[in-house]
Image (cartoon, coloured by chain):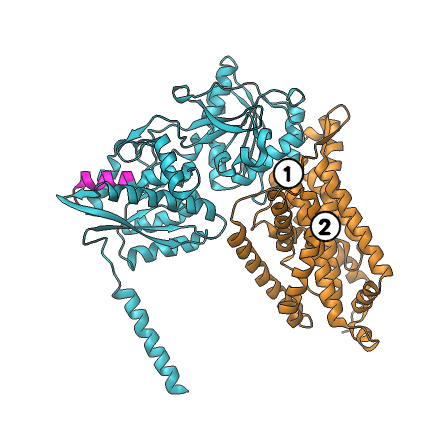
Chain colours: A orange, B cyan
Amino acid sequence: MDFLIFQVPMLTVQAVLDGLLLGILFALIAYGMALQWGVMNIINIAQGDLVILGGYIAYFMYLYGIHPAWGVIVSPIIMYFVGVIIYKLVINKVVDRDLFISILATFGISILFMQLMNFAFGADVVLANSGYGTTMLFDNSVTLPNSKIFSAFISIVFAIGLVIYMKKSKLGRAIRATAQNARAAKILGVDTEKVYAATFGINAALCGVAGALISITFTIHPYMGLPYTIRSFMIVIVAGLGNLPGVAMSGMGLGVFEEFADYILGTEFRIGSVFLLLVLILVYRRFKLSKKREYLK
Amino acid sequence: MKIKNIIVTFVSAIAILFSTSVVSLAKVVGDKIILGAAISLTGKYSSNGVHTQNGYNMAVDRINSMGGVKVGGKTYMFDIIYYDDESNPKRAAQLAERLISQDGVEFMLGPYSSGLTKAIAPVTEKYGVPMVEANGASRSLFTKGYKYLFAVLAPANLYLDVAIRTAVELNGGKGVRIAQAFEQDAFSQDVRLGILDAAKETGSKIIIDDKLPKELNDMAATLAKVKATKPDVLVVSGHTKGALTAIRQIAEMKVDVPMLAMTHCDAAKLSKQHGANSQYALCASQWHKTLTYKDDFFTDGMTYDADFTKEFGYAPPYQAAESSAALLVFKDAFERAGSFDQKKVRDALAATNMQTFYGNIKFAEGGQNVDKPMVLFQVMCDDAGKCENKVVAPLKWASAELIHPIPKWSDR
């Protein structure tokens, strides 16, 4: 039974496509995390909660009769300001401190957001219907919801847009300079405080986009943020910091890996197998590093 | 500075002393019977927690306004002390401890969900406090030999049992091929055990048996397997999330399956969120307003539905109805016991045999209600896309005929 996937070849196609579409969406969230991790050296535990908050924005638009797809424009704008406010209130106080402090601070923000969302929106699971229909391939044996295709497409658009923005715009260059050497950037006249705020804002905006897409393709719930944080953390770890194409690749790779794990090992091992992969990659990295590095004793 | 510290310590010590020893309300104060309940008013169970509380309150008001509880020739009124357990089992157990040892409560009402009931039951058991609960259906609650736990609802393993039996019946008594996906939590896994039992008894075969992660929001892989294997019945149980995700993805992936059976459709407001896509889904429910059970307080299901809607502004889900029934059970037991002695009340509870608007109530040895079958309703929509839940099984209460097999997506 477990190897149904090998008996029905079309399932392989289905698994690969599902995995890719899912992975691209995850990569978008991871992309934001990689950006702020690289620039500010902060691991944002509240990442997933920002995603869910973005999802609620799209959901409320849907409730008021606006098509939720507009959420991918409205949600990032609102979330940008939410991000900047969080930065001004909390993050700027921990940005130069060690990683542990920032993890604690963002963990606190995460709990606060969960409870606030629960308080404001209720504990019901909700979703926004896009009414996009389905694409059928290979004589109806492979089905792809158009909402997933839409999500992947929008994610790619935003990711490419951001790469171009980082390369061409003044702020983008300032962000990259700060990431390389904050002190040098400051000496050369870059307002790092502003750069940090913008970086956190951009990250929140990306989460907003992803959230809106998740409300269209999956479901949202105030307590559903953590899995997104963990997933993006894993993608960034696998890709390495400052490696944006790597984030996209590892996102898609993990998506496909997960789908196959589901078919071969069973649904219950889906998440577990991703963790196992993470451990293996870390061990391998460490092994490679230990070969390269020379110790002075 | 030092003196200030000493004073602060002294004052807080006295405060602690008072809070633990002096404030000890008796179970029955004047003409009031005080019940205790830890309810999830915040946290992830808060919506169902509120349904539970509304159900309790509705019954308290009704019983009190209709003459209260008569024990030993005297009339008493119900009153409930609520605490918010924040949807957290540890907190729930602490609060139960507090209700019993500090507030002096001697009779308890259950919290929302199997998980929280599991956390509280050992505490009430330890103190010998009778607890009537209405929202913990997990089978494991009834196999631990608890003496003071009584549940007005049918245990979880019976939730979808009816669906399998109906499918077999429609298949001319031959076994069916079942695909199932269950969340990995106590409740859903109990529902799964029930299906395994039913499958064994009917000679049915389980061809897909997926366990969904708690943070589930994607069932695409399971559904792709269903598409490839074409089972006769697809069973899904994963609380509200599971029901919503399943319906969304079944529609998106155009999965054709002759019978789709689920739990938590009521709470998920399936037809409201998904409209015609949820059509034909079979849902297990503890209660439905069209059932013809009767009692003196709420008359029948339809009246309860109307009264509840008038008071709280929304139609009662079964979580509210069963919670109201818990108080009817308590009232009945107090009056039969003729005393507030916990042992006597416990024995009276164990001997309960009554009908309420919610269903017949009679407890088995383990505390579960064995006299009330589950009902299955099917989501049925008209051409305008307006959907309604109609009872289709058991046949005794059916208000509509089961539509089987579900029409293919290409024909819908």
Is B51 left, or right, of A80 in this rendering? left
Is B281 left, or right, of B352 in this rendering? right
| Relative image position of residue A202 (x, y in whole percent) | 73, 59
Mark on residue A73?
Answer: 2
Q: Quadrant of residue B361?
A: top left
Which residue is the extreme one toward the right?
A168
Q: Magenta part of the protein: which range?
A: B328-341
Q: Quadrant of residue B225?
A: top right
CA gap, disc 2 to disc 1? 17 Å
To which residue does mark 1 refer? A129
Is B412 left, or right, of B100 in this rendering? right
Q: Quadrant of residue A117?
A: bottom right
Residue at position x 67%, y 38% in the image: A130
Is A85 left, or right, of B104 in this rendering? right
Q: Earlier in the sequence, mark 2 or mark 1?
A: 2
- Disc 2 marks a residue whose amino acid type is Ile
Label 2 crowd (10 A; few <14 / some 14-19 / many >=20): some
